[in-house]
Image: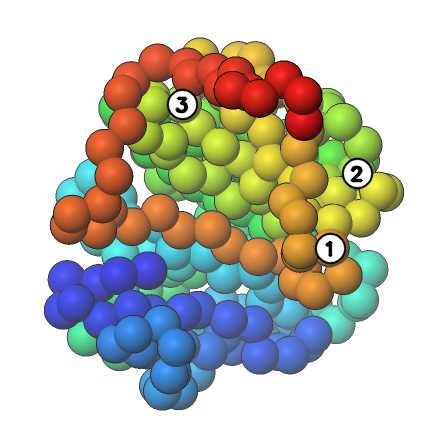
Amino acid sequence: MRHTDGMYYVAHSTARAGNQIGLASSTDRVSWTFLGNVTLTASRVGSVWAPEWFIDADGSVNIIVSLRFGGSARGAFRPYKITATDSSLTTWSIPTPLVGLPAGSIELFIVRVGSTRHAFYKNSRSMRIELASAPSLTGPYTIWRSPDFVAGDGQGPALIPLDNGGWRLYFEHCRQGGVWFIDSYDTFRTWSAPVELPGLTGVVKHLTVVKEVVAGGPTLPLGRLSLRSADLGH
């Protein structure tokens, strides 16, 4: 996440068990400085998993996390959010639940389209990526694409807007392996066939893709594009 101070920030898991996540910052996305751990103060947090940033319409900086309560390793994860209470990201609110999502929702990635928040998540019971929407970050969410709009077992969803007006969803394919993507041009109602990203299979897992607009970058026309070979002999 690029913050208002111009710095880049990463939130990461610290251990399979515990009640903390870690934060690090960078000026160039290459060299990183560990800033410390954030302790989630809700009672009996046993595991914290898959933190993801979400900047809401009011400018608030949030981290979406999946929490497991108690000591059981088999308990279901549930989604929560914490909100930075200062611009330096050193103090955070207590965890607040995201209402309407099923037990076992994990690895949430949330985007805002207009006044609607869309949550993409892995259902750890069905092992599929599902989609739910809500009028606010904390819900209530309504599941409207279930149980399987990504064919097969998917996890670690990450979504970016495309320059031509569509959206691209990246995910890890558990059954076939590798990192794949699908595109939508009608606000998540229909999707293209999955395409595997070359060079990433066996190298990365649970990646997050972030789009950053860079001054002087390419400008693409709106609408779908098609390419045709100029040399049909090859």
* 109 lies left or right of 166: right
Question: Which amino acid type corresponds to the residue marked 1 in the rendered image?
Answer: Thr
Q: Residue at x 25, y 76 (%)?
A: 27
Q: Which residue is mark 1?
A: 201
* 177 lies left or right of 65: right
Q: Nearer the viewer, mark 2 or mark 3?
A: 3
Q: Position of residue 208 (x, y in %)?
A: 51, 54
Pointer 2: residues within 10 angstroms few (<14), some, or many (20+)?
Answer: many
Question: Which amino acid type corresponds to the residue marked 3 in the rendered image?
Answer: Gly
* 75 lies left or right of 95: right
Mark 2 in CB contact with mark 3 (< 8 angstroms): no
Res 4 seen here: yes
Front residue of 32/52: it is: 32
Q: Earlier in the sequence, mark 2 or mark 1?
A: 2
Q: Nearer the viewer, mark 3 or mark 1?
A: 1
Q: Which residue is mark 2?
A: 153
The answer for how far apart the CA atoms under marks 3 and 1 are is 25 Å
The answer for how far apart the CA atoms under marks 2 and 1 are is 15 Å
Q: The residue tagged with tag 1: helix, strand or loop? A: loop
Q: Earlier in the sequence, mark 3 or mark 1?
A: 3
Q: Position of residue 215 (x, y in %)?
A: 15, 50
The answer for how far apart the CA atoms under marks 2 and 3 are is 24 Å
Q: Which residue is mark 3?
A: 166
